């Protein structure tokens, strides 16, 4: 019997509820084996999951329109926000409550109304997990162990995440799970010609619009901080390929960060206040948002430029699927959510731990 993906996720969340409660409430010293449900088929245009996307999409049409809503995590709740007013359109209490640290990068599987986010449920490597949160009920379960960040492919068929591996919990792999085929593949991510892992500063990943390439962000390495991984090819000297000018390998700061590719092939990224190797103080945040050429890293234009002495620190960058709307997270405490419009920051909401755009319809 073919099981729609929304039924698969509901069953998986239900089956993992006891595990989640144990991890959060009692602080289990080691994560129990996570049961895996049967591989779900990919949602098609006639499936209930695809119908759910149409009903939730702002335009209700079949083509992709600019997003008008964002999904945000506040710690206690998962919320759907109006990008124009900041009004909470929908809210669900995360159940059971998460007392563990939550990563800023989150991802949305729109047909399933499911949000993926990273959480630290303990001190072991396997306790660094990606969890799936149901937008309607707030129920959650573990989607991937030994993982730090997640991204859902544009068609919803693949989940990518940064993997933690080895005895020292090195953050040096990217894994992709294909829901359609039930397969899982991993790629080691290395610096150019170094033959060594990029290290614990591999921080973000976003799918390119083609659903084949992943755009990776890293704080360390002898490159600009941006790499592109071809998920149809094995790892090699040119996979992932490095984008842009080289930085200083020993310096963790001074890199582009949170890169995301737009449909036209350009890359939007956070630009640091000054570059590594220039004697900058360590700053693990950006101050400006730029548009780059994907193959050379050359700057095409600037979306946001802030004077260094009055700059609002930006720790997260979110580009909607059409590439036309940009939001950032930062400010005092790093919990303010802004939209970047006409070169200025417009506050949407505060008290945010992580956010992303809900795809338009």
Image (cartoon, helix red, strand yellow):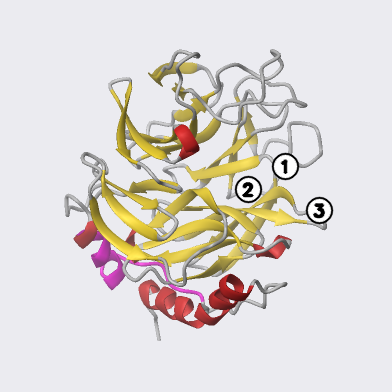
Per the image, is 50 magenta? Answer: yes
**C-alpha span from label 2 to label 3:** 27 Å
| Label 1 sits on residue | 236
Q: Residue at x 45, y 29 (%)?
A: 268
For mark 3, give the secondary structure.
loop
Q: Residue at x 35, y 40 (%)?
A: 320
Q: Is residue 344 left or right of residue 242?
A: left
Q: 87 or 361: nearer the eye? A: 87
Q: Residues within 10 Å of mark 3 (few under 14, many from 20)?
A: few
> Magenta includes 109?
no
- For the residue pair 360 and 308, the one nearer the viewer reads as 308
Q: Which residue is mark 2?
A: 233
Bin the neighbour count of mark 1 within 10 Å (Cα to Cα): few under 14, some 14-19, many 20 and up. few
Q: Which residues are magenta?
A: 39-54
Q: Are marks 1 and 2 in contact (CB under 8 Å)?
A: yes
Which secondary structure lies at badge 1? loop
Is any part of residue 257 visible from this angle? yes
Q: Quadrant of the N terminus?
A: bottom left
Q: CA distance from mark 1 to mark 2?
A: 9 Å
Of tags 2 and 3, the one toward the viewer is 3
Residue labelled with disc 3 = 168
Pair 3/1: label in front: 3
């Amino acid at each position: 019997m073919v099981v729609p993906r929304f039924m698969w996720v509901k069953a998986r969340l239900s089956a993992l509820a006891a595990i989640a409660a144990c991890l959060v409430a009692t602080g289990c010293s080691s994560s129990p084996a996570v049961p895996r449900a049967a591989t779900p088929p990919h949602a098609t245009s006639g499936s209930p999951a695809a119908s759910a996307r149409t009903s939730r999409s702002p335009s209700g049409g079949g083509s992709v329109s600019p997003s008008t809503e964002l999904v945000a995590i506040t710690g206690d709740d998962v919320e759907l926000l109006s990008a124009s007013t900041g009004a909470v359109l929908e809210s669900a209490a995360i159940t059971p409550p998460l007392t563990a640290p939550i990563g800023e990068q989150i991802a949305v599987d729109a047909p399933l109304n499911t949000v993926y986010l990273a959480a630290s449920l303990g001190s072991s490597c396997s306790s660094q997990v990606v969890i799936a949160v149901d937008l309607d009920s707030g129920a959650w379960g573990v989607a991937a162990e030994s993982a730090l960040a997640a991204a859902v492919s544009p068609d919803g068929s693949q989940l990518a995440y940064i993997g933690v591996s080895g005895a020292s919990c090195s953050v040096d792999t990217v894994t992709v799970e294909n829901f359609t085929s039930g397969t899982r593949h991993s790629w080691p991510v290395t610096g150019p010609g170094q033959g060594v892992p990029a290290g614990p500063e591999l921080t973000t990943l976003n799918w390119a619009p083609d659903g084949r390439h992943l755009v990776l962000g890293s704080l360390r390495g002898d490159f600009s901080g941006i790499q592109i991984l071809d998920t149809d090819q094995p790892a090699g000297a040119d996979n992932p390929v490095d984008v842009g000018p080289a930085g200083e390998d020993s310096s963790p700061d001074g890199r582009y960060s949170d890169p995301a590719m737009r449909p036209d092939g350009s890359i939007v990224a956070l630009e640091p206040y000054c570059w590594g190797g220039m004697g900058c103080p360590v700053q693990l945040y950006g101050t400006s948002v730029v548009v780059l050429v994907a193959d050379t890293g050359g700057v095409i234009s600037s979306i946001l430029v802030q004077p260094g002495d009055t700059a609002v620190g930006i720790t997260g960058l979110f580009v909607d699927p059409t590439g036309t709307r940009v939001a950032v997270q930062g400010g005092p405490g790093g919990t303010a959510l802004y939209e970047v419009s006409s070169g200025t920051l417009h506050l949407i909401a505060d008290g945010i731990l992580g956010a992303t755009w809900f795809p338009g319809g």
